[in-house]
Image (cartoon, rainbow, N blue to C red):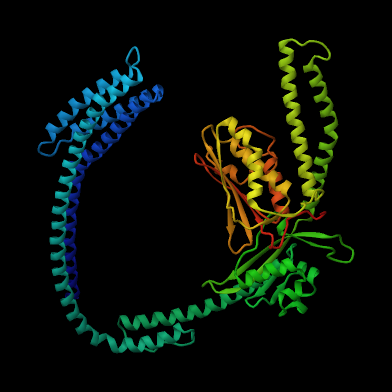
Amino acid sequence: MLSYLLLVGLMLLVMLVAVVGFFRLGRSIDRILEDNYKSVVAAQNMKEALERMDSAATFHLAGQTAKARQQYQENHVRFERAYQIETKNITEAGEQEISDDLGRRFFRYRTDLERFQSARPPLSATAARERYLGTLQPQFAAVKQRTQDILDLNQAAILRADRRAKADARAAALLSVGIAAAAVLFGLGLAWRNIGALMNPLVSLTRQAEQIGAGHLNQRIEVRRNDEIGLLASTFNQMAERLQEWRKVEAEHLQRAERMSDAALENLYDPVIVTDAAGRVAYLNRAAAGLFGPDAGARGRPASEVVREPRLATAIGRAVGQEETSAEEGEAALISFDKVSVDSEPRVYRLRASPMRGENGIHLGAVAVLEDVTYQQELDRLKTEFIGVASHELRTPVTSLLLGVQLLQEGAVGTLTDTQREVVGALRQDLQRLERMMRDLLDLTRLEAGATPPRFEVVAPAELIGEAVEAVAAQSRAKGIVIKNEGYQNAPEVRADRGQIGRVLVNLLSNALRHTPSGGSVKVTTEIMDGEGAVRFAVRDTGAGIPPEYLSHIFERFVQVPGATRGGAGLGLSIAQTIVRAHGGKLYADSEVGSGSTFAFTLPTAGAPITAAVSKDQ
């Protein structure tokens, strides 16, 4: 006990020395923060405010007087606030003189800048430039230099304080190391003395404990002593008995959980296929057995032989071999089965296939789930048919209304007053917008129903882009927006419907022009997708961008971003996505608020296979 008390005393001494060193180092850091850091931050803020005030002067030269006054008002207050902090934190020799000189120079600069901005009558462009270059710019440079002098003075003081703190830390570290080394030597001596008395019984205790740790819970430690080691042996024996009881309880729980898991999978409405790491079927639930045959006959056989559906077999193979998840959206993820049983109707399922991994990341196999979406597909079909019929039936009365409005505007039924012409003009605009929306709806329903399949031909990407850019050239010139055609001239030819893909490009370019302010730019590019057998078309604008909460919904029907420029009914992107899917490609968007948006889609090259996402009717 005495030897341990000595060790504790040495440890306390080491801790005391270290704590004292830490407190000294903390006081040094506090001095740096209290004495100089406030002045450094204030000087940096003053420099930044000065630069903004100088920018306000240049804005005034450029004719942006309102923006110049606003920026000046914001930043001269910011400068004076930082200057007040500096004047109350004078800590270095000579800093008071520099601070006073800075205040005088800033007062003169601020007075001349205010006269420059509020001159009556306003100065001519030449006089304003001469006043800025001859008076304001030298004053700005002088004030900025005095601000830099304060910054340099306090930074130098911080460096000196930092060196002092490092010296204190080194001294405390050396003292702590010395005392710690003495404590280690003393502890080694005590340990050597005590090891002999403890080692022999501990070796025996360890051997028997290893047997228990290896799972031999029927083993008991035979050490008959009345000291702490004997108490430890007795505790180990009690632990072994309890572990043996808990093992039995856990085995019962595990068996119950396995039975519940099997029952849940077996009674699940959706078909479930489980494979091992070699791709052989390990389990089929009742719904899957109704599709592919009894579970007993399927177990152990390759999944490709059991499922007899190419896309499902491919998804399972990818999850097993490449450990990739197959969870596509839209028509590409749907699988149809003509009949689940003799008297049943055809069913449509959405495929989900995922790899299974163990606790240590070991690949165990794959699980595929087929979600029954037959009812949703039927609802989508009925909705599409209703929209198509309604749009078709409404075209005739809308056309008649347009004709009647046109006759009214032309004075066929008499001269209209100004108020009447205004009302009729508004009616015509609304009817034209309604006609465009119905036309888009009809096109969308025809595309989704497969009534207008693509007429494929081999075409160069540069031709598609050139025709689309030419189609929107007048719109870009009217808004003063430059379209940069950076399409890769040697990009491989693609297999596409020239008219439909042209419509997609024109829609994307029109949207980009509509949401880009005058003076901006729109860039069109192409890129070869190595390893995918596809070409990527991209349209990039410099507009306001799309908020993240709307980015995932912009391809849905009638979706328009709040605050964006109104130009249609929100069907253009939905139509474009349907066309691109029918070509076997993908349409997606990327946007950042304030930096613009990029809409891109891929098309397979002429030699690549087409896997179009089309409806079942097509």
Left or right position of 541 against 164? right
| Percent of width and height locating residue 123 | 33, 16
Residue 88, compared with residue 231, is above or below; it is above
Left or right position of 142 against 467? left
| Percent of width and height locating residue 214 | 46, 84
Q: Residue at x 49, y 84 (%)?
A: 215
Q: Residue at x 49, y 86 (%)?
A: 216
Residue 258, compared with residue 158, is above or below; it is below
Residue 613 is drawn in which quadrant? bottom right
Left or right position of 305 against 54? right
Residue 322, compared with residue 164, is above or below; it is below
| Percent of width and height locating residue 5 | 18, 72
Q: Residue furthest right?
A: 343
Residue 260 visible, this angle? no
Frontmost residue, 4 versus 500: 500
Q: How many marks?
A: 0
| Percent of width and height locating residue 18 | 18, 61
Residue 509 is drawn in which quadrant? top right
Q: Quadrant of the C terminus?
A: bottom right
Residue 531, compared with residue 617, is above or below; it is below
Residue 595 visible, this angle? yes
Q: Quadrant of the N terminus?
A: bottom left
Frontmost residue, 322 versus 38: 322
Q: Residue furthest left?
A: 93
Frontmost residue, 361 versus 82: 82
